[in-house]
Amino acid sequence: MSVDIEKPEFWETNFQQKQEMWGLEPAKSAMVAKDFFVEKSIKNILIPGIGYGRNAQIFRDSGIDVTGIEISKTAIELARKHYGSAMIIYQGSVTDMPFDNCQYDGIFCYALIHLLDNEQRLKLLRDCYNQLSDNGYMIFVAISKKAYTFGRGRLISQDRYEPFEGVRMFFYDKDSIQKEFGCVGLFEITEVEEQYPFFIIKCKKEDPSNGHVNSDKAPR
């Protein structure tokens, strides 16, 4: 019987057993996001699925305030150990957002959205968009169909597979990105090679006073 990756027990067990399983160096796409946020003078960001903070510290080093959401208590303890206790991290699932009433200049979500089912992905997009300040930016990093794991293991639903025991992934292409992100200010899709081939997906929340997209058009 497989363990559900969307359950806290999955991540708690993984972090307990593997600790800093991805190392302490930030991902390539996190560095891309940091440079972009610095260029746009972003002052504060939200990181849903912050893990043990390896992708958070580079933003803080650049003077950006970071708030995180993390389902695993062990991961939060590891973040405190490596990066101190000043960073706010809410313990809970991203499916239970929002955890505060703050509006953030930026949101960075790394390798998380593709682990959710269709309803959860749309809810995450809506919740993130709703917590984004007008003229704010959000960057999602999601796995591509070019990954060797695409099409492997048990088929869950269209483009969603269980390539490893308990790990279910939705694999994106540019059409599915347009379909899911098109209503939340999508303006750029780039590709990056990391552990897997990923898409870096950039969105902007236009100020409604300028007559552009507003939160009423976020996915429901």
Image (spheres, grey):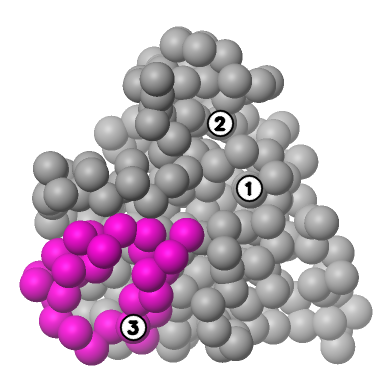
Residue at left offset 28%, top offset 83%: 87
Q: Is residue 79 located in the magenta-colored stretch of the structure?
A: yes
Image mark for residue 186: none
Give, as a three-letter code, the residue at label 3: Ile
Task: For label 3, count other residues whose C-alpha is less than 10 Å away and answer few (under 14), some (14-19) or many (20+).
Answer: few
Residue at left offset 86%, top offset 88%: 209
Q: How far, Cα to Cα, is label 1 from label 2?
A: 10 Å
Q: Residue 178 placed where, x, y %?
A: 73, 42
Classify residue 130 as left or right of residue 42.
Answer: right
Q: Nearer the viewer, residue 208 or 153?
A: 153
Query: The C terminus lies in which quarter of the figure?
Result: bottom right
Residue 78 in the image: above or below residue 130: above
Give, as a three-letter code, the residue at label 2: Phe
Task: For label 1, count other residues whose C-alpha is less than 10 Å away and answer few (under 14), some (14-19) or many (20+).
Answer: many
Assign a secondary structure to mark 3: strand
Residue 88 in view: yes
Give, as a three-letter code, the residue at label 1: Arg
The residue positioned farthest toward the front in the image shown:
1
> Which callout, 3 or 2, points at the residue further toward the start of the chain?
3
Which residue corresponds to mark 3? Answer: 88
Displayed quadrant of residue 156: top right
Residue 79 in the image: above or below residue 118: below
The residue positioned farthest toward the right in the image shown:
211
Classify residue 181 as left or right of residue 189.
Answer: right
Q: Are marks 1 and 2 in contact (CB under 8 Å)?
A: yes
Residue 178 in the image: above or below residue 187: above
Q: Which residues are magenta?
A: 65-93
Residue at left offset 53%, top offset 77%: 99
Which residue corresponds to mark 2? Answer: 170
Q: How far, Cα to Cα, is label 3 from label 1?
A: 24 Å
Residue 190 in view: no
Which residue corresponds to mark 1? Answer: 121
